[in-house]
Image (tube, helix red, strand yellow):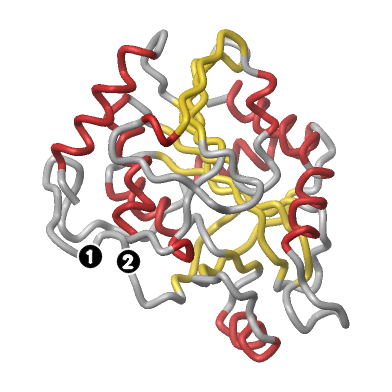
Amino acid sequence: MDYQKILEAKDYLSPKLKEIPKIGMILGSGIGNLVNQMSEIIEIPFSKIPYFKTTSAVGHSGVIVAGYLNDAYVIALKGRYHYYEGHTLSEVTFPVRVLKLLGVETLIITNSCGAVNKDFNPGELMLITDHLNLTGNNPLIGKNIDELGPRFPDASEIYTKSLRTIALKEAEKLNIKLNEGVYAWWTGPSYETPAEIKMIRTLGADAVGMSTVPESLVASHMNMQVLGISCLTNMASGILDQKLTHDEVIEVAGKANQSFSKLILNIIKNI
């Protein structure tokens, strides 16, 4: 990854912002409506930002939105692009690098994913406590950018414990069921086979999806605090006697939008 390119993207965005955003968000499939609650917003399509890629995934708008959520000035990626779209992991995580240089200290990452834990149900949320990288790839492979972080970063607490504590307390206040679990990253775009889901469960994961882990690794590498929350949109392959569709993912995520938005708003108030 070219550090100069990150600086150019940052320099393009910075003058457009009203102030330095300390909180950043990545909003996944079908759960981007939180930005509708922002005030004094600006929207910038990915296509206009230097070195950003466009997204082809359904449910991902592909815009940066900045504005106020209550009293906090927040910048959000409404949608993301994925490894399965043919992008390199350096490209997938490029926006996170830019957010850091814009001043973001805390990154809230969301996604829609499949439940592997049979005690979970579609429409519920899951707080990510840790992850399994099952892709055999890592966004930090290649020349290290020393200005951003160390060559060999610690990975013992990718998902910041203090933020998880806040999330659990706020979920309890709102009477929102917030499961806790390990998220497994699978490349996609095909959904997993029943045999693969059995393997993933045996390895200790509670949910599986096609994003989040590369962004979390890169954010942690840059010493950002990370909070990960998944919307469980379906039971993973083989658990129920039915086939999986992306339409189902978008539909269930949309239904969970209200509780998700309330939870994120309350979390931001307490950061």
Total number of numbered discs in the rendering: 2
Per the image, label 2 sits on a secondary structure element best described as loop
| Position above or below: 184 against 156 | below
Dots 1, 2 in contact, CB < 8 A: yes
Residue in the picture at 35% in, 31% down = 49
Query: In screen coordinates, is 180 left or right of 248?
Result: left
The front one of 34 and 124 is 34
Query: What residue type is disc 1 on?
Result: Ile
The front one of 172 and 247 is 247
| Tag 1 residue | 141
| Position above or below: 185 against 59 | below
Residue in the picture at 32% in, 66% down = 138
Query: In screen coordinates, is 66 left or right of 32?
Result: left
| Tag 2 residue | 138
Quadrant of the rendered image containing residue 22: top left
Residue in the picture at 67% in, 29% down = 34
Per the image, label 1 sits on a secondary structure element best described as loop
Quadrant of the rendered image containing residue 128: bottom right
The front one of 86 and 64 is 86
Q: Position of residue 31 (x, y in %)?
A: 69, 41
Residue sitting at the far right: 241
Query: What residue type is disc 2 on?
Result: Asn
